[in-house]
């Protein structure tokens, strides 16, 4: 009987992804995942942090739950205040949580500062714990991420934050650097967006056409192709069609300007005053010839 109960508990734990044990952290996870009570979970996460029980996971998980209940600002303060209690192995994941919370709060300057810090850490060899790759999750699957890919990803995020500030020149520089390291269609589209905002339409069109032709990784993705279409539509709405770009200056000759008035005079020769519309046309004519 006792063995059956233990098996049921173990199955329950596996199904609900609750860690084993009976400490504050386990109780916090039970409240979060089984009871679906985020506020109760936060209380137990605090107890785990204060009691030194799996602090790395407790701080990160608590911040995630706080965001879910619109306590994002409090979560940011908690991470910045208590991350010193966490191991060096947890710092990178805490940075990622912090970035996500900064986005939620619209703290663009803080995102830029943190992303620049991550780039310095990459340059100094402080990421991935000295290893050339790390294991990450993408769409529920484990993948291997290289230093090169991580650098391009951080640069891409930095470029995006600059676009949020409207600094398209800085974003352009960062995106180009990211593309040199590890090019893909998403960063290409973002770069084209920056060029459109700077009225550099030919450069933007060239990049978008390359994406459409499948010259970048991810070009065949449906979302990417939709984005290319949207950017091309924006570009066309800003840039005159090719057959109008080199059109000589508009000139309205006297025959055209005087023709309507002469025609009206033939129809109604007895009228002594010109219609108001022709006064406006005449004024417009003189403005064009100035």
Image: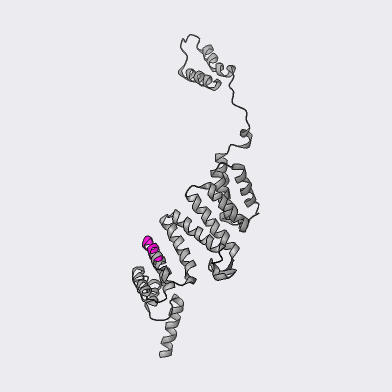
The answer to if 97 sits in the magenta stretch is no
Q: Which residues are magenta?
A: 70-79
Residue lying farthest front? Answer: 124
The quadrant of the image that shows the N terminus is bottom left
The answer to if 71 sits in the magenta stretch is yes
Where, by quadrant of the figure, is residue 101 drawn? bottom left
Give residue 178's position: percent from left, percent from top: 59, 56
Give residue 133's position: percent from left, percent from top: 59, 69
Q: Residue at x 57, y 70 (%)?
A: 130
The quadrant of the image that shows the C terminus is top right
* Most foreground residue, 132 or 195: 132
Where, by quadrant of the figure, is residue 250 drawn? top right
Give residue 127's position: percent from left, percent from top: 54, 67
Q: Residue at x 45, y 64 (%)?
A: 97
Query: For the stretch drawn in magenta, what is the main secondary structure?
Result: helix
* Most foreground residue, 262 or 73: 73
Q: Residue at x 40, y 74 (%)?
A: 29
The colour scheme applied to this rendered structure is one colour
**Residue 241 sits above or below residue 87 on the image:** above
Q: Residue at x 50, y 50 (%)?
A: 163
**Residue 88 sits above or below residue 173 on the image:** below
Give residue 118's position: percent from left, percent from top: 51, 61
Left/right placement of residue 236 relative to residue 26 reads: right
**Residue 37 sits above or below residue 99 on the image:** below
Residue lying farthest bottom? Answer: 1
């Amino acid at each position: 009987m006792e063995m059956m109960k233990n098996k049921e508990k173990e199955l329950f734990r596996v199904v609900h992804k609750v860690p084993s044990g009976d400490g504050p952290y386990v109780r916090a996870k039970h409240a979060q995942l089984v009871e679906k009570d985020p506020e109760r979970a936060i209380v137990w996460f605090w107890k785990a942090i204060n009691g030194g029980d799996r602090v790395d996971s407790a701080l990160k998980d608590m911040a995630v739950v706080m965001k879910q209940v619109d306590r994002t600002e409090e979560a940011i303060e908690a991470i910045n205040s208590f991350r010193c209690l966490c191991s060096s192995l947890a710092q990178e994941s805490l940075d990622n949580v912090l970035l996500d919370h900064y986005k939620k709060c619209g703290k663009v300057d803080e995102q830029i500062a943190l992303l620049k810090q991550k780039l310095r850490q990459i340059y100094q060899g402080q990421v991935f714990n000295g290893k050339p790759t790390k294991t990450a999750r993408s769409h529920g699957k484990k993948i291997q991420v290289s230093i090169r890919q991580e650098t391009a990803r951080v640069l891409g995020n930095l470029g995006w934050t600059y676009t949020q500030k409207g600094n398209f020149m800085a974003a352009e520089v960062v995106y180009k650097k990211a593309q040199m390291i590890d090019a893909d269609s998403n960063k290409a589209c973002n770069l084209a967006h920056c060029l459109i905002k700077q009225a550099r339409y030919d450069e933007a069109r060239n990049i978008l056409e390359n994406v459409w032709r499948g010259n970048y990784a991810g070009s065949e993705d449906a979302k990417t192709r939709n984005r290319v279409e949207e950017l091309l539509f924006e570009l066309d709405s800003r840039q005159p069609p090719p057959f109008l770009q080199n059109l000589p200056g508009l000139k309205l000759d006297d025959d055209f300007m005087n023709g309507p008035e002469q025609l009206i005079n033939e129809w109604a020769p007895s009228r002594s005053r010109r219609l108001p519309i022709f006064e406006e046309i005449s004024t417009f004519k003189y403005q064009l010839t100035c």
